[in-house]
Amino acid sequence: MELFKAVVRNRHIRIMMLLIILFTSMTVPFYSLTGHFKAIEDIASKYIPRGDTLLILDMDNMPIQQPGSEYAIVYVSPSSLDYNGYGISIHVYSFNDFEAASEILGIRLPNLEAGECLISRYIADDLGIQQGDIVTFTIGGESYSFHVKGFTRIFPAILPHEVELDKLGYILRSSGDMSGGIDGYALGSYTPLIKSLENEVGRLLTIWAIPIYLLTLVSLALVSSRFLYSMRSDLSILRTLGLSRIRLLLALASSLTPIILASSLAGVSLGLVLSQVAAKILYIAVGGITVVPSLDPITYLGIYILSALAGFIGIFSTLVGSGRLYEECA
């Protein structure tokens, strides 16, 4: 207990604590901000189908049209959308069979009656469009007015089949050989995209984190060397009382362990607060794009363990490497 009090009162220990807190809090925001893939997934899900599908542009591919094959013809055309004086240029889509398209794409596409349409949730939020509102599409020089029946997360706008649009091709499930050997374009789900981003960020995290942890190790080793020097009189007394070097090392370890663990916990917690501040700065800097920092429990625990481990290695490597723990002063 007396050794613990002496350790706590030592000014070099306070410097060690500040170093652990500083370096840990610097690391956390990078993990929490770049690890926020939910925002990326929400954006991707507005435009990319959830399930893997195949788009075949060869409209003369007869094997697809054989009975029993599940497919839907896709129609598309450039258009301008007008609502309350606001206009945007988009592409509109339609299908010859909404039920088949819903099954293939893995989304809910209700059958549209004459005068009904679906609007992208993203576009609706941007223009303030509500369900039941009337929007106007200009397609090929002709204007069409529709009631908004609902919203979709993939296509900008979906119109009933009666509107004259250009045939784009067939969509069908990518599994199996329903394409008849004709090559098509894979409309893959956004899952591989998110996984690829995770791997890329993982490599960036390694580049970022390794210098931080190495700097932590070196800094703590230097400070712990000064700590041992300042504690030489206390260590001399303990050696005079008969404590062996091993028991002295264990006593120092038991005194320093709660300090390192507490400092690492404080550093991670402070890092979460700094993440919120960094998110606000990014919101202002990049033009209002909201980034919500998040840190799952496994990542939180991993950062905490790495931070504490860096503290242990940095400090105890000096203790062990000091040889006789300044016993020459005994």
Image: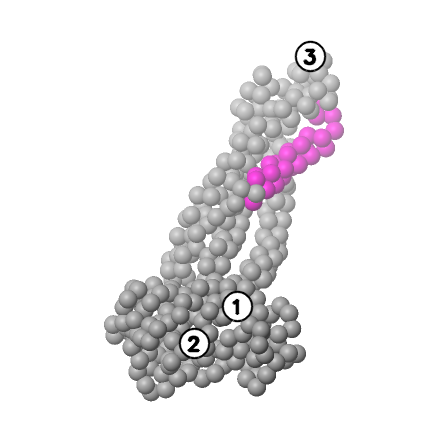
Where's residue 3, x and y in %? 60, 19
Please tell me whether residue 327 belongs to the stretch shown in magenta.
yes
Q: Residue at x 58, y 62 (%)?
A: 192
The span from disc 2 to disc 3 (Cα, nearest Å) is: 89 Å
Q: Secondary structure at mark 3?
A: loop
- Tell whether label 3 touches label 1 (CB within 8 Å): no
Which is more foreground, mark 1 or mark 3?
Answer: 1
Amino acid at dot 2: Ser
The span from disc 1 to disc 3 (Cα, nearest Å) is: 81 Å
Which region of the structure is painted magenta?
A: 299-328
Q: Which mark is residue 104?
A: 1
Q: Quadrant of the N terminus?
A: top right
Residue under numbered circle 3:
241
Work out whether mark 2 precedes mark 3 in sequence or the reverse, and give the earlier one. 2
**Disc 3 packing (10 Å; few <14; some 14–19; many ≥20):** few
330 and 89: which one is in front?
A: 89
Where's residue 296, x and y in %? 52, 45
Does residue 323 appear to the left or right of 13 in the view shown?
Answer: right
Residue under numbered circle 2:
94
Q: Quadrant of the C terminus?
A: top right
Work out whether mark 2 precedes mark 1 in sequence or the reverse, and give the earlier one. 2
Q: Residue at x 60, y 27 (%)?
A: 256
Magenta stretch, main secondary structure, is helix
The answer to whether any part of residue 181 appears in the image is yes
Way the structure is coloured: one colour
Q: Residue at x 48, y 48 (%)?
A: 294
Work out whether mark 1 precedes mark 3 in sequence or the reverse, and give the earlier one. 1
Give the residue at the far top of this rendering: 241
